[in-house]
Image (cartoon, rainbow, N blue to C red):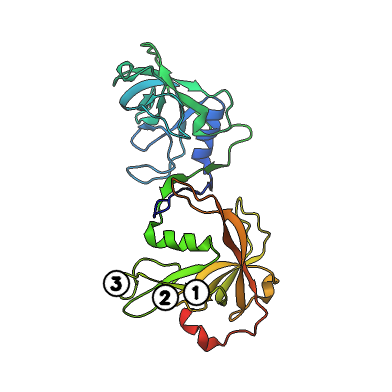
Amino acid sequence: MSEVLTAPLVVEFPFTRSLGPVQSAFLTGLRERTVLGVRARDGRVVVPPVEYDPVTADELRELVEVAPTGTVTTWAWNPSPRRGQPLRTPFAWVLVRLDGADTALLHALDAPGPDAVHTGLRVRVRWAAERTGAITDIACFEPADGEVTEHQVRPHSGQFADPVSGITAPARLDYSYAPGRTQSRYIRALAERKTVGERCPACRKVYVPPRGACPTCGVATGEPVEVGPRGTVTTFCIVNIKARNLDIEVPYVYAHIALDGADLALHARIGGIPYDQVRMGLRVEPVWTDGTLPHSPEGMGGAPIPDHYRPTGEPDADYDSYKELI
């Protein structure tokens, strides 16, 4: 078994934002197979449209319609598309100056290979079969076979039925997490329902979870010390907003807990007590549950992990016993 554990980890945060009149008109227009730009103070047509002039910072509202055809100004070949990108097969990222526009729009070009792409290539929009009012309503661009059309830029009111008022932009990071030797030992100890920290050889403080080095003295920590399993609530907060994909009813309490024998408080959820009865000094103990720990290539499988902490029934700890850990 490898000494250091690894595990796939995903950090995901979907960001929801409202749209102003310009961006709303642009995205709603895409839903209706209409590409809109905005005229800047110097007369240039900016696509995608912006709400403020990039040169003067003046507010812009003069919307115009441009063509769904254009010219590639620069490009880069993408041989290995990733999850969430516009196409599943190799494609080119291109900057396209649409006919009637003076700036370029970034999107994907569906082409058989890099030899089929060049600066000056004429392209046209391939619209998505189902459109919702998002940049993905342009499924991609495709070669226009030398097609050149005259396009007269036309003023547009920006008014559509049922305009798009907001969007959700997903943000996601997939990576492989390796906790290192120190935290790998900590995780393996949890599999045995033990909490193990490390002691600093200089100041003698015990850190849980262990960090591999003392943040105060700056020296390596290597002496393992088993702490807990019981501890004391030092500070806490009441959570009233339900997190996505977290099957816990609100309100609930998250607290800093100073485990017996530790010189650093860790954080965990408090259960087994009404949220409004949690208090500083409350004595608690872990409630273990089966879960999946990060695993080495050989695999560790399922192992118990602390799901939450609950009251022990002991008298509350004296404030002086944990005040340095608040």
Compared with 276, 88 (above or below) is above
Q: CA distance from mark 3 to mark 2?
A: 13 Å
Q: Which mark is residue 206?
A: 2
Q: Is residue 200 left or right of residue 281?
A: left
Helix, strand, or loop for circle 3?
loop
Closer to us: mark 2 or mark 1? 1
Q: Are marks 2 and 1 in contact (CB under 8 Å)?
A: yes
Q: Position of residue 59 (x, y in %)?
A: 43, 44
- Amino acid bearing label 3: Val
The reply to whether residue 206 is visible in this rendering is yes
Q: Earlier in the sequence, mark 3 or mark 2?
A: 2
Residue 307 point in image, percent of width and height = 60, 62
Q: What amino acid is labelled 2 in the image?
A: Val
Q: Which residue is mark 1?
A: 227
Mark 3 Cα-neighbour bin, 10 Å: few <14, some 14–19, many ≥20: some
Q: Is residue 136 left or right of 53 when viewed as pictured?
A: right
Q: Quadrant of residue 199?
A: bottom left
Residue 41 vertical placement versus 29 (above, below): below
**Residue 284 location, x and y as percent?**
61, 75
Res 47 → quadrant: top left
